[in-house]
Image (cartoon, rainbow, N blue to C red):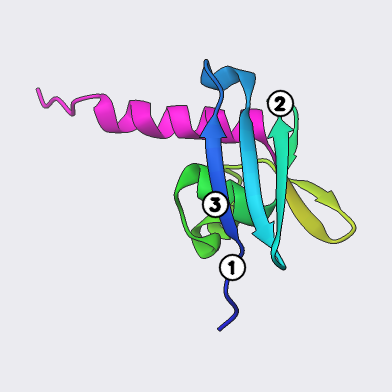
Amino acid sequence: MKKLPSIEIWWLNPPTEGLIIRRKIRGDIYERKVKPSGLLSSTEACKVLGITIVYLYRLVEKGKLRVVRRNGNLYFKLKDLIGFKLRKKRLKKEPFLIG
């Protein structure tokens, strides 16, 4: 099984300002700042949302996450991921009331 590259994510304050991604690829450290309109790869999107790659693709198929396709690869806008994360939290926090 192929080992995924190590990815560290630091949210800027406030989180709507973006984040910093630090990856280790082939022994080199690669760091970049991503603004809300910036694009993330599938692996980076999984790390941001805290989900697996299979679940991420399932969300794309169901139309719950918007995707940008470039050269056969899938990329995700950070603002879409933040919106999805906030919707997911709101659904968990609201109590389910009966009658």
Q: Earlier in the sequence, mark 2 or mark 3?
A: 2
* Residue 82 at x, y percent in the picture: 55, 30
Residue 68 part of the magenta segment: no
The residue that appears at 65% across and 52% down in the rendered structure is 23
The answer to whether marks 2 and 3 mark residues whose Cβ atoms lie closer than 8 Å is: no
> What is the quadrant of residue 57 in the picture?
bottom right
Q: CA distance from mark 3 to mark 1?
A: 11 Å
Q: Amino acid at mark 1?
A: Leu
Residue that protrudes farthest toward the bottom in the picture: 1
Image side of residue 90 versus residue 10, left or right? left
Relative vertical location of residue 68 with respect to residue 35 in this rendering, above or below: below
Q: CA distance from mark 1 to mark 2?
A: 24 Å
* Residue, disc 2: 35
Magenta segment, which residues?
A: 76-99
Mark 3 residue element:
helix
**Camera-side residue: 21 or 50?**
21
Q: Amino acid at mark 2?
A: Lys
Which mark, residue 60?
Answer: none
> What is the quadrant of residue 17 in the picture?
top right
The residue that appears at 53% across and 22% down in the rendered structure is 15
Q: CA distance from mark 2 to mark 3?
A: 17 Å
Tell us which disc is closer to us: 3 or 1.
Answer: 1
Residue 82 part of the magenta segment: yes
* Residue 89 at x, y percent in the picture: 36, 30
Mark 2 residue element:
loop
Q: What secondary structure characterizes most of the magenta part?
A: helix
Residue that protrudes farthest toward the top in the picture: 14
Q: Amino acid at mark 3?
A: Cys
Quarter of the figure with the N terminus: bottom right
> What is the quadrant of residue 5 in the picture?
bottom right
Mark 1 residue element:
loop
